[in-house]
Amino acid sequence: MNVCKDGLLSVSKFAEICNITAETLRYYDREGLLTPDYIDPQTLYRYYSVERYRCVKVICELRKQNFSISQIKDLFDNADRDFAKDILEKNLKTIDIQIQQLQNKKENLELKIRYLNGENLLDRCNIIEEKLFDDRYSLVKETNREITNYNDFFYTMSAVEKNLSQNEDFFIQIFSNTCYMALVRENPEWSSYKDSPVSIAIQLNNKCDIVPEGFYLHKSKSGKYVCMISKCRIFDRKNQIEKMLNYIADKGYKISGDIRVIFLAGQVLISPCINMYCEFQIPVE
């Protein structure tokens, strides 16, 4: 193959100048993204003008920003400023989501490190605390039956993971650093423990606009919560909740919403066994 032909560069020489592979240039040609300036009809060799260098650099930069080939083609084919702005803003939003996911993972690792360094959440076991929370959101799995035992519980949890992993949009945007929880339905007339149905939920870092089929969005309102960490079975929670109800009665509080039960297995680096470490959170006013 001639390195140069009438001032044009061969595919290998042009690729060398652009610091990419010749196969990458051939791929861009096949995709209709960057066609050669000339193709020899006898040999089918591709030739490029040096002016195409800037075009290659733009493509490489956009690829680094995770733009797809089709998105780059759309940008090149459409000179409309608003169209280009829309594509750029969508990719910026994707990057913001990825940053948030990494931040969530970082915070989760920091929590585990603090635990290993001696900041043991379990030192606060069975100690009642009052905490203030902002509005929080959870995705609750809709079920056709009440979850009343551990077989139901873990089968439902498995179904949740399978469902969400198949929902690509939701999985990418939200399903990072997942924290499982349970919701015990509100019973405002509780003065002593009464058994109530339990729903499996996923605690979200932020309110989401995407609600997968089979789920509904639940809001836990901001305000004061009576909280306690305990090692127990979620379905054998009577002693824990009775202790908290006595505290609530002594303080003159009233229950104002569903009880949140946060599973702490992932935070304290213990296996999610039948006797889980949980934090009970009861909203009061």
Image (cartoon, grey):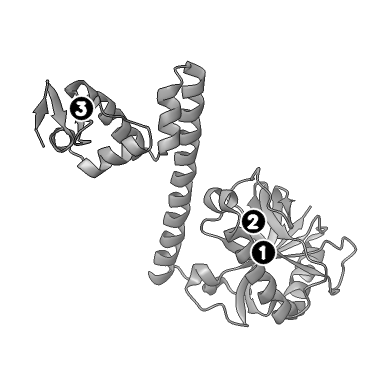
Q: Position of residue 67 (x, y in %)?
A: 41, 37
Foreground tag (3 vs 2) = 3
Q: SS at mark 3?
A: strand
Mark linked to residue 48: 3
- Please report whichever mark, 3 or 2, sits nearer to the chain's N-terminal start: 3
The answer to which quarter of the image holds residue 237 is: bottom right
Check if mark 2's residue and mark 1's residue have beta carbons within 8 Å.
yes
Q: Nearer the viewer, residue 278 or 84?
A: 84
Q: Is residue 177 left or right of residue 37?
A: right
Total marks placed: 3
Q: Nearer the viewer, residue 71 or 147?
A: 71
Q: Is residue 67 visible?
A: no
Q: Residue at x 64, y 56 (%)?
A: 131
Q: Residue at x 52, y 73 (%)?
A: 123
Q: Residue at x 60, y 65 (%)?
A: 161
In space, the residues marked 3 and 2 are separated at their CA atoms by 66 Å
Q: Position of residue 208 (x, y in %)?
A: 64, 45
Foreground tag (1 vs 3) = 3
In space, the residues marked 2 and 1 are separated at their CA atoms by 7 Å
- Please report whichever mark, 2 or 1, sits nearer to the chain's N-terminal start: 2
Q: Position of residue 179 (x, y in %)?
A: 58, 62
Locate the N terminus and report the quarter of the image it occupies. Answer: top left
| Residue assigned mark 1 | 227
The three-letter code of the residue at mark 2 reads Lys
Mark linked to residue 131: 2
